[in-house]
Image (tube, grey):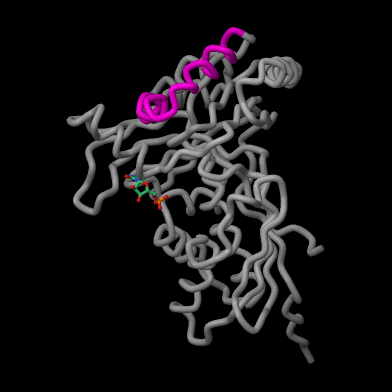
Amino acid sequence: MTVAPEPPRGVRVRVPAKLNLSLAVGPRRRDGYHELATVFHAVSLYDYVSVRPADRTEVQVSGPYARQVPTDRTNLVVRAVEKLGELSEAPRDVSIRIEKNIPVAAGLAGGSADAAATLLACDTLFQYGIRPDRLDQIAAMLGSDVAFALHGGTAIGTGRGERLAPVLARGELHWVLAISEDGLSTPDVYAEFDRLEPDPDAPEVGPDLLQALRRMDAAKVAEALSNDLQDAAVALMPGLEQVLEAGEELGALAGVVSGSGPTVAFLVADAASAIDLSLGLAAQGVVADVQRVSGPVAGATTVPWR
Ligand code: C5P
């Protein structure tokens, strides 16, 4: 006699933040989104999302960035549960616990990461057995960066960012993240981009970055970092100019605003340089928080329950 395995009581998922090593933005489409060509890169700054069955869906948040996180339907994790409910025959409610280490509205896709983690956690908890390509489709319905958070690694994103192709990138890159006190609204940054660039070119990923990643040549990756949203982010938060200058003066290979900002990602040569730069930035007091991370790392992954 075979005995079916007991469903788990709860499932805990670890999910990384993302950087954009390059972000080319094209014209606004009819649906309001912009056509993109980006290189996503998952880094070792993680949120943890735990789900267990409950009578009604609720969200609790702890951790250094808990304060800015909504616990109502505006949180993408609740929309992830609702979306799975719409698509399944027997909707299930869950209690969701988020340990929030990824700053909010920071250009690091923290909200998208939590939504991806919730999809994986619910699929595992209720043993839905959703096929990976279907999970990607559901992720894309929730937001442009959610599918990447499931996969992690380094990947080209096209469409509005949801169409992914893995990039060959062996080895490790070391980063220092300069995190601002205030966030930036992604729609506001795109609106500012439209104002600054009324007629952008069709977006593409340059060959130099891909070649540098294949060789994992940090100096060459540094030369190829780019972000079409950077000027818009700086226009809305002029202090970012000072942060970029400070990091480069303190020895970073290069700095780039991640996504719609305002986090600035500084690429450094090695782990020791990352310590020097993070101490230097903290001493200058130009940013609210500094994190040393490395990439690429895996996407959303189940970890032992606790
Ligand atoms: O997809 P997501 O919900 O993360 O996008 C947030 C907002 O960012 C969108 O409502 C849109 O204003 C802007 N956006 C865009 N083009 C993209 C991705 C996001 O204009 N490719």
> What's the magenta bit mostly, secondary-structure-wise?
helix
The residue at the point 64 percent across, 40 percent down is 297
At a point 45% along the width and 26% down the height, the residue shown is: 210
Location of the C terminus by quadrant is bottom right
Q: Which contiguous range is marked in magenta?
A: 229-249
- For this rendering, which residue is in front, 216 or 267? 267
Task: Write down the quadrant of residue 9 in the picture.
Answer: bottom right
* Picture coordinates of residue 201, whole percent (x, y): 22, 29
The percent coordinates of residue 17 (x first, y second) are: 59, 42
Is residue 230 found inside the magenta-colored segment of the image? yes
At x 66%, y 52%, the residue is: 66
Residue 159 % position (x, y): 32, 46
65 in relation to 119, above or below: above
Is residue 6 depicted above or below 154 in this figure? below
Left or right of 50? Residue 72 is left
Q: Is residue 102 above or below residue 85?
A: above
Q: Does any portion of residue 270 appear in the rendered image?
A: no
Task: Give how far across and how far down residue 105 sits, in percent.
Answer: 51, 43
Quarter holding the N terminus is bottom right
Q: Residue at x 19, y 31 (%)?
A: 198
| Near-viewer residue (271 or 110) | 110
278 in the magenta segment: no
Q: Which corner quadrant of the image does residue 138 belong to?
A: bottom left
Res 152 visible = yes
Residue lying at the far bottom of the rendered structure? 1
Tally of marks: 0
